[in-house]
Amino acid sequence: MTSSKTVQTDIPRHEDIVDERLVRWFFYASLVYMGISMLGGLLMAAQLVHWYPIQNIEFLSAGRWRMIHTNAVAYGFIANAFLGMLHWVVPRLTLHRVASVWLSYFIFFAWQVIVLSTAGGIIFGPAFQSQDWVMEAARNLHISMNLGAQGLEWGETPFWIDPVALLGLALVAFNFLVPISKAKGSLYVTLWYFMAAFVWTFLTYAMGNFLPEYALAGSSAGAVGGLFIHDLVGLFVTPLGWGLMYYLVPIILKKPIWSHGLSLVGFWGLAFFYPLQGIHHFLYTPIPMFLQYGAVISTIAVEFVVATVVINFFGTIWGDSRMAFKNLPIRWFYTGIVYYFITCFQCALQVTLTFQKLIHFTDWVVGHAHLVMFGVFSQWIFGMMTYLIPRLLKKDWYSNRLCEWHYWCSAVGVFVMFLDLTLAGLFQGYYWAALQPWEVGLNGSQPFWITRIFAGLAMFFGFLCFVYNLVMTMRKGESNATATATA
């Protein structure tokens, strides 16, 4: 009896180790960037069918909004949401606060400055750089000054932001690795993924934003750029996303993960195969063929790794499949898991040299990218927010119906967009393979591009339902039931 009481007193209270206000702030910032990104995506889609509403304004040109669209998703929406979740999950798994709460608040504000400065550099950098006094200062200092976007996919952040962003990633790693190092006993697989992500993200960002810019050129820079593009998804977003799934799914289902062994197979498979596949973005290029073949093989191998993770999660819900219909966060999570399997299966096909002849540079790749970023990770994040926001606000959702609208508009909308762009890519590939004039491919793509706009509008409508539901939830009175359930 005495030992039982001792164990209870050794467990810190939730409010003593988790700063819920900070988690809310990260979530709110994340949603702001998602709204901006979706607006940018709709503008880009409208431009392709000649419906672009903002003509002849340099700062709002489609090319710049395209970079705002992708950067706001990766570094604004996903990064902020994951930082919020880390501040909830790591203290609860380790039973220790982050290394410094003050540092956490500094990281929050500093990260918003980094994201907004990136957007400012993309939009206003070229105009500022063309000023006579700026060019004169660069000549006097004997430097080549590029204040706008860098020429690297997903790495468009201006050069003067990169060192600050890298420092921010180092501070994030320090803040969470300290409590993880204090944890007693064996570490749950979620913390394995988190620790790897802190190291991988720092190295991936440094590799992609410094080596091609300052140290490499030609096909070598292309090879590193390909690694950066893919490792940003596989070594930053994926380990954090899967780690959070391994934490939240067992908690909501109230049962342990089906196989701890399979969870480790998934972790080590990701660590071994994922860094090798980035070159598949540059097939049929001067990059040595042995690297291209290696990327193809490792990409196909990752599909088998992902299959073990998917099997593990479906083994966990086996016997409780009704939860996927009754529990909305679980439905979000398992929808993303299914989409992840589809994405990786598609990837295993499209990286073969034979398939690349048909779909290279087509909208097939665009559909693939939207399914993985919005169909997988955004679905997971919305599921996390749907689960946590009532616990953070101590209030039940204002409207469960609006939560359902958000789910169905997002899940169906992104899948329609994926199918639409996949078909568009096949048609484009066959047009080009038949040596049809370029205008034939453009005209044939118009119905698909129009369909994409309406799919995007459905997704945006679902997002607006979620934001409205959140605002109304914040305004309603406190729910004692939810406040009690948080404990």
Image (cartoon, grey):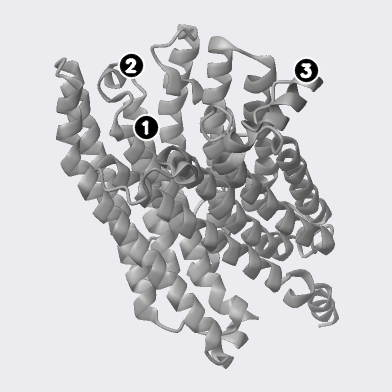
Q: Please say if 463 is above or below 258.
A: below
Between marks 3 and 1, how big is the CA–CA gap? Answer: 45 Å
Secondary structure at badge 3 equals: loop
Q: Residue placed at 25% from the left, 51% from the top?
A: 416
Foreground mark, 3 or 1, reads: 3
Q: Please say if 303 is above or below 120.
A: above
Query: Considering depth in this image, is 148 or 169 the residue closer to the camera?
Result: 148
Q: Residues within 10 Å of mark 2 (few under 14, many from 20)?
A: some
Per the image, the residue denoted by label 3 is 142
Give amino acid for label 1: Cys
Between marks 2 and 3, how big is the CA–CA gap? Answer: 45 Å
Q: Please say if 412 is above or below 311.
A: below
Which residue lies most toward the front here? Answer: 132
Q: Quadrant of residue 272?
A: top right
Per the image, the residue denoted by label 1 is 347
Per the image, the residue denoted by label 2 is 353
Give amino acid for label 3: His
Give amino acid for label 2: Leu
Q: Residue placed at 16% from the left, 19% from the top?
A: 437
Which numbered disc, 2 or 3, marks the residue that appears first in the sequence? 3
Query: Considering depth in this image, is 440 or 305 the residue closer to the camera?
Result: 440
